[in-house]
């Protein structure tokens, strides 16, 4: 996957080199030179990057290209803007595809057979969640876990990546969130968890926006004609889930809705859900690696939703 990402970065660099030769704007040329230097360093970094590190490198490359678009004030533009925007879209797909490899499968409540349901050991020093899916039973636990939750220092760079994407697209999420009465960051976090922040896919399930969804839930949005905009599809997904009728957006309720979205299947196993607590001191190992398949030794490499909320709070973004 790093190979295809490198190819996309090289393609974007070729577009920039052509543009550098065509523009008469000295300031724009200076920006292009800086971005070319940065993208060249990104190519070298990709050779040695793990998957999520590579996703961050590719996302940063996309951000660099945006600075070139912003600097393009003098023509001739020819096909430059459309070419560079196409490069940004392809890089965004690359970044999302890398993220999708780590996306957590749905954890159904009774998914794992008892023989595979090995709870974490006492040596792991992680708290045991209650075996319930009733919010009133879990309200205090969510607050307690969140208060005790601390980011593992080795994942600081990964958490920063998620937060940078949430803040970058905050206005897009607000456009959808405000009319529905949903916190913008709740939508953004779902978008990151399920779609890798790819705006060319349905929030419902990550299917492409050029058609109605083909995976569960199938045939969404039910009205309108494809291709759909991300905003109209996201609105459909959130209404379908009934989030527009939620009136309680306290922290425990948010965490409950996140866990409900992925499933309560970790609770009977005594494992804090990685969908919430991955990258924190409350989660060590244990992961659903497929439908009805729990591996007690597998580790999630996706940032938990609670960690993203805590990181946003620490930056004063909430």
Image: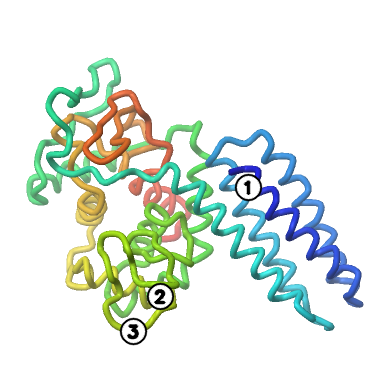
Q: Are marks 1 and 3 in contact (CB under 8 Å)?
A: no
Q: Residue 262 versus residue 207: which sits nearer the camera?
A: 207
Residue 313, percent across and down? 40, 53
Q: Tell me the number on the disc at residue 231.
A: 2
Dot 2 crowding, Cα within 10 Å, few <14, some 14–19, many 20+:
some
Mark 3 Cα-neighbour bin, 10 Å: few <14, some 14–19, many ≥20: few
Image-quadrant location for residue 122: top left
Q: Quadrant of the N terminus?
A: top right
**Horizontal and vertical percent for residue 192?**
42, 55
* Residue for badge 3: 224
| Colouring style | rainbow
Image point (67%, 41%), residue name: 46
268 horizontally vs 40: left or right = left
Answer with mark 2 or mark 1, whichever residue precedes in sequence: 1
Quadrant position of the C terminus in the picture = bottom left
Q: Is residue 96 left or right of residue 68?
A: left
Q: Residue at x 69, y 48 (%)?
A: 6
Task: Say left or right for 53 vs 285.
Answer: right
Q: Are marks 2 and 1 in contact (CB under 8 Å)?
A: no
Quadrant for residue 68, please give it: bottom right
Q: Which mark is residue 57?
A: 1
Marks 1, 3: nearer the viewer: 3
């Amino acid at each position: 996957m790093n190979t295809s990402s490198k190819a996309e970065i090289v393609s974007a660099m070729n577009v920039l080199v052509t543009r550098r030769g065509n523009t008469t704007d000295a300031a724009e040329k200076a920006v292009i030179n800086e971005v070319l230097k940065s993208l060249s360093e990104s190519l070298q970094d990709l050779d040695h990057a793990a998957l999520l590190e590579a996703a961050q490198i590719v996302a940063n490359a996309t951000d660099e290209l945006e600075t070139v678009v912003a600097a393009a004030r003098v023509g001739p533009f020819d096909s430059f803007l459309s070419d560079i925007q196409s490069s940004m879209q392809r890089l965004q797909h690359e970044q999302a595809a890398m993220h999708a490899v780590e996306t957590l499968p749905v954890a159904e409540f009774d998914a794992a057979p008892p023989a595979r349901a090995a709870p974490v050991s006492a040596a792991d020093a992680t708290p045991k969640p209650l075996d319930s899916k009733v919010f009133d039973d879990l309200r205090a636990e969510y607050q307690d876990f969140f208060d005790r939750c601390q980011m593992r220092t080795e994942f600081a760079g990964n958490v920063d990546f998620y937060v940078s994407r949430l803040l970058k697209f905050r206005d897009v999420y607000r456009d959808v969130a405000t009319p529905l009465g949903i916190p913008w960051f709740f939508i953004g976090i779902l978008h990151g968890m399920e779609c890798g922040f790819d705006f060319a896919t349905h929030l419902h399930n990550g299917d492409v926006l050029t058609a109605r969804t083909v995976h569960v839930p199938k045939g969404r949005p039910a009205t309108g004609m494809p291709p759909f905009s991300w905003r109209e599809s996201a609105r459909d997904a959130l209404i379908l889930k009934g989030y527009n009728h939620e009136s309680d957006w306290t922290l425990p309720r948010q965490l409950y809705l996140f866990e409900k979205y992925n499933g309560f299947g970790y609770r009977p196993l005594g494992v804090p859900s990685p969908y919430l607590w991955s990258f924190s001191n409350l989660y060590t190992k244990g992961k659903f690696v497929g439908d009805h398949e729990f591996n007690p030794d597998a580790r999630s490499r996706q940032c938990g939703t609670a960690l993203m909320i805590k990181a946003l709070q620490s930056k004063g973004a909430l």
